[in-house]
Amino acid sequence: MTQIDNCCSIAPYFQVAPGQLGAFKALCQRFVAQTRNETLCLYYGFCFDGDVAYCREGYRGAEGVLAHLTNVQQLLEEALTMAELIRLEIHGPEIELAKLRIPLAGYKPQFWILECGFRT
């Protein structure tokens, strides 16, 4: 059965500072543990290419994104002491992205509008 796709995904890329990769990976485990029980989270995990980290995450609508950011705010602040946020993409339908444009403006994200697709 096909349903309307209101999923919002976040794609943050972090450049980990020299000598901080081990500590950053340990922090990623804490992010995963902190996020695990979020009811609006669809998926969550970290990928690495050398010293660049990417967090693969998706939520049920803008409300899920905002709830997650509130939940991990302290961990994110800690992450930014050992890594630089070098790119941030937010993907989803415009009706959901519109709810995120002002709250996320300080992160200077690139918004990608979902125009066609489906979710099963």
Image (cartoon, grey):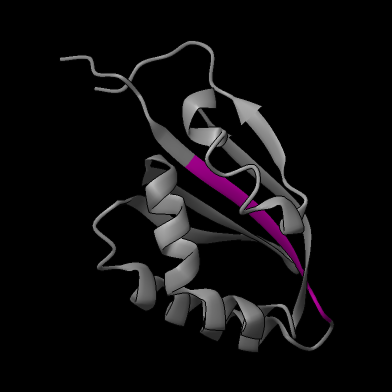
Write the residue at 30% across / 68% down.
Answer: 36
Viewer-nearest residue: 84 or 65: 65
Residue 113's place in the image compared with 18, above or below, is above
| Residue 34 placement (x, y as % from top left) | 37, 76
Write the residue at 73% across / 57% down.
Answer: 107
Viewer-nearest residue: 52 or 106: 106
| Residue 13 placement (x, y as % from top left) | 70, 57
Quadrant placement of the N terminus: top left
Write the residue at 43% across / 14% down.
Answer: 117
Residue 106's place in the image compared with 62, above or below, is below
Residue 50's place in the image compared with 42, above or below, is below
Chain part drawn in magenta: 9-17
Q: Quadrant of residue 14?
A: bottom right
| Main secondary-structure element of the magenta-colored stretch | strand
Residue at the left extreme of this rendering: 1
| Residue 16 placement (x, y as % from top left) | 76, 74
| Residue 28 placement (x, y as % from top left) | 52, 75
Quadrant placement of the C terminus: top left
The question of residue 48 being in magenta is answered with no
In this figure, what is the number of numbered marks? 0
In-image side of 94 versus 4 (left or right): right
Viewer-nearest residue: 103 or 35: 103
In-image side of 88 versus 55 (left or right): right
The question of residue 16 being in magenta is answered with yes
Write the residue at 64% across / 42% down.
Answer: 101
Residue 75's place in the image compared with 90, above or below, is below
